[in-house]
Amino acid sequence: MDWGTELWDRCDVIEKHTHSGIELVEKYVKFVKERTEIEQNYAKQLRNLSKKFNLKRIGKDEPDGRLTSYQSFMDILNEMNDYAGQRELVAENMLMNICADLTKYLQELKQERKSYLMEAKKAQQALESTNKQLETSKKRFEREWREAERAAQSAEKTDQDINATKADVEKAKQQAHMRAHTAEECKNDYAAQLQKFNKEQKQFYFTDMPLIFNKMQELDERRMRKLAQGYILFSDTEKQVMPIIGKCLDGITKAGTNVNEKNDTLVVIEQNKSGFERPSDAEFEDYSQGINRASSDSSLGTPKASIDLLGKNRGKNFWLFSKKSKLSPSTLPPFLTPPAPSPVNGPPSPKFGRDPLSYCLKEINKTVKPRISSFRTLRRSRFTPQRIPPAVTEDFTHLPPEQRRKKLHEKLEETGRKLQKEIDQSEALGKMKSVYEKNPDLGDAASLAPQINQTNLNIERLRGEQNKYETWLADAGGRGDTPRYKSHSFNNSDTHEPLSPDGAHSDGSTPDAASHAIYAEFDDDFEDEELAAPIGNCTAMYNFPGASEGTIAMQEGEVLAVVEEDKGDGWTRVRRSNGDEGYIPTSYVSISLHK
């Protein structure tokens, strides 16, 4: 069934229907455009939201930067940013594949429909013109036929009139004959016009208009197919980004599963652990006997005045939660750490950065006895670190012991990297100098002398800094960690003497007595230490020769037991099945700890 056969007489309906179909396409294009605007605004708002809550200003060195909860939140923001990009891609594809394509097709559709309507209009005008000619010939035939009848009647009347002359009769007959001949010609013309009109009318209704209607039907069907493709593209555009959106959502899920509350707790402990020992019991001071608190058995030779001062400061307990201090800055202690417990309760902890004697001397010089009227006033006047920040010192004595050791470890690693870089540069300069000496045409060996001298000075300076940090680390109670760090340092040099794990040159030079005693003590402790239970396993990803003291060799794929975790210096203590123990680079193994 087609329009040309079934709707041959409904041209106005066909015209209205095709116009309505074009309006539907225009509405759909407008709908998709507004949808793309919504997508673009949505993507923009998502990006602004991600940017607003982005924590990039918190680096890994910040307190919260290493927490898995913060890292997972950053991953979620990144995934949301990627999700916004997919929404932008949806809007872009809809604009290009639907709106632009349908808009172009609409122009062609309107032009084609207009041409078909023009053809129908021309055919209609041609038929109307033939119809007008038919009506004109018909009216002329009717008029001439009536005139011929009147002329015939007049001639007959004249012929019967006895008074009419023969000439009048002949004239009347000739007039009637002429009118009859003209009427016959009009009749023939009318018949010809009628035949022509019927032929053109048949051509119009059975050939021309059905053909035009069928073309418009085909046009309308193509329009509907094109619109249906636009409907499908609307869905396919969404489906194309679904896999990536699914990955974004999977990434958000993974970020949630990556939150490790135990690890975050350990990070908080590692970052904030002070290393101080808990305050000991307060001693009874018998003022009824008129004497000060009895001195302890040994206090590193602390004089009586110093002991008295320690007793006064001992009353100032290290309160965990206290109100802001109301003491003037002149009455505040010079550093954050509380006084060391008296020797009665045992020797002072090595984690305490200063000995009691020096603390007493500084207190005598800097501290003014405050006027304390009651115990409540004493509680309110506790020292709060937020009021007067401690001065930053090169040996990090302003930090708590644990944080001080951590900072010193970081400085050792940084100095070691710089030293290795200078040693590598010195080796390169030495090789270049050797090449220039063998082949003077390549360059002047003497021109390298300033660079070589400067490099040697830098090496000596960095070695001095390294020894300085090692000494401070030993004073801070980090003697056991130092050999681990130095074992991976600079042991592959040809032009420079290698370094032993304790940082000294291995050319037979004698270290100072203090350093020798420190490392001898560490070796004794390491040898006497009982075998600790493994806390996990590790698998070697690379070969490690373990040529330095304190390290252990391993082969790729070898499985070792983890005895001690990496404490931030890049080394992990492991044990073989045969009992051999040593340190290996943490980055060389894949570690799995027991839960």
Image (tube, rainbow, N blue to C red):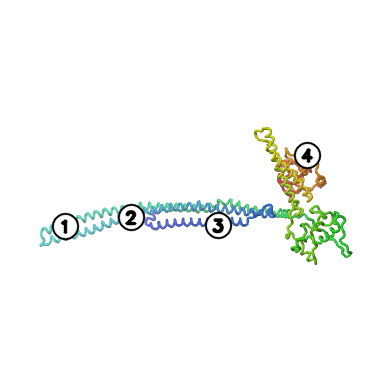
Counting residues from the N terminus, which is met first, the one under dot 4 or under dot 2?
2
Is label 3 or label 1 in front? Answer: 3
Q: Disc 1 versus disc 4: distance between alpha carbons?
A: 156 Å
Few, some or many residues within 10 Å of mark 4 (<14, 14–19, 20+): few
Is label 4 or label 2 in front? Answer: 4
Q: Disc 2 versus disc 3: distance between alpha carbons?
A: 54 Å
Q: Which residue is mark 4?
A: 507
Residue 68 image position (x, y, % from top left): 68, 53
User: Would residue 55 appear left or right of 23 to someone viewing this image?
Assistant: right
User: Would residue 404 appear left or right of 152 to someone viewing this image?
Assistant: right
Q: Amino acid at mark 1?
A: Gln
| Residue extending furthest toward the right | 289
Is label 1 or label 4 in front? Answer: 4
Labelled pair 3, 4 in contact (Cβ < 8 Å): no
Q: Which residue is mark 3?
A: 41
Q: Which residue is mark 1?
A: 175
